[in-house]
Image (cartoon, rainbow, N blue to C red):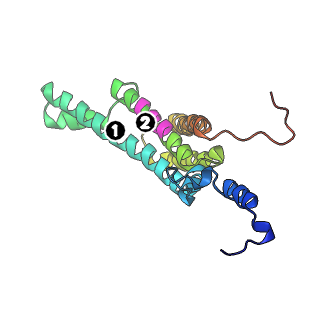
Amino acid sequence: MPRLAASETPENLRTTWIQTADMSNNPSKPPKTDANDKAAAGGSPMRAVLTGLAVDIGGSILAEIVLEVFHQSQLVASGLPPDQVDDAMRNVRMDSPFELLGIVLGSACSVLGGYVCARIVRRDEFRIGGVMASISALLGLLGASSSTPDDLVVLLTVTTAACVLLGVKFGREANQRCAPPTPPSAGAPRS
């Protein structure tokens, strides 16, 4: 039988075994990975902005296409000749139900785009969301038609930025609800 060193007494070996057999070595518990840390840290700001813009602008364009097709089909079904349908589609009034619904749907897409941006980035949400709101507003200014009055263009641009930031606010609140609780500091009183 081999001799045990002085530090390897049965009692010391038992204590060492108990200390190393903690819950971190539990075989039924999944191992800690870098992916868990990355998910908590958040995604790339560039990816967050680009994805948010895709949701905002892509959703707005899709909603506009669907509304235009629906409006055109209603005009054709009413018996208008094709040249009058084309004229009516080019000269839609800003206070028509289709234009107002388009503004509401575009605003909803902006809110959703801001929300998606904040959920992806998971840190500095308002800073990154502000970048996205600025780019979205700039693209809205560049895409505005020349027949739209200037005051309406400014109003819709400000509305777009505000809706994106509202979505960012909702995304930040969702991030805070999903975040793991922070441990209390060492000097904080315990209740």
Question: 56 or 28: which is nearer to us?
Answer: 28
Which residue is labeled 1 in the image? 64
Magenta part of the protein: which range?
104-112
- The residue located at (70%, 57%) in the rendering is 14
Pinpoint residue 147: horizontal percent, then vertical percent. Answer: 42, 40
Pinpoint residue 84: horizontal percent, then vertical percent. Answer: 19, 33
| Drawn side of residue 55 relative to residue 25, left or right | left
Q: Please, what is the three-letter code of the amino acid marked with disc 2?
A: Gly
Q: Secondary structure at mark 1?
A: helix
Question: 91 or 1: which is nearer to us?
Answer: 1
Q: Is residue 81 magenta?
A: no
Q: CA distance from mark 2 to mark 1?
A: 8 Å
78 to 35, vertically: above or below: above
- The residue located at (56%, 34%) in the rendering is 170
* Label 2: how many Cα within 10 Å (few below 14, some 14–19, many 20+): many
| Drawn side of residue 191 relative to residue 36, left or right | right
Mark 2 vs 1, N-terminal side: 1
Give the image quarter of residue 157.
Answer: top right
Q: Secondary structure at mark 2?
A: helix
Question: 1 or 184: which is nearer to us?
Answer: 1
| Drawn side of residue 110 relative to residue 2, left or right | left
42 to 89, vertically: above or below: below
- Which mark, residue 106? 2
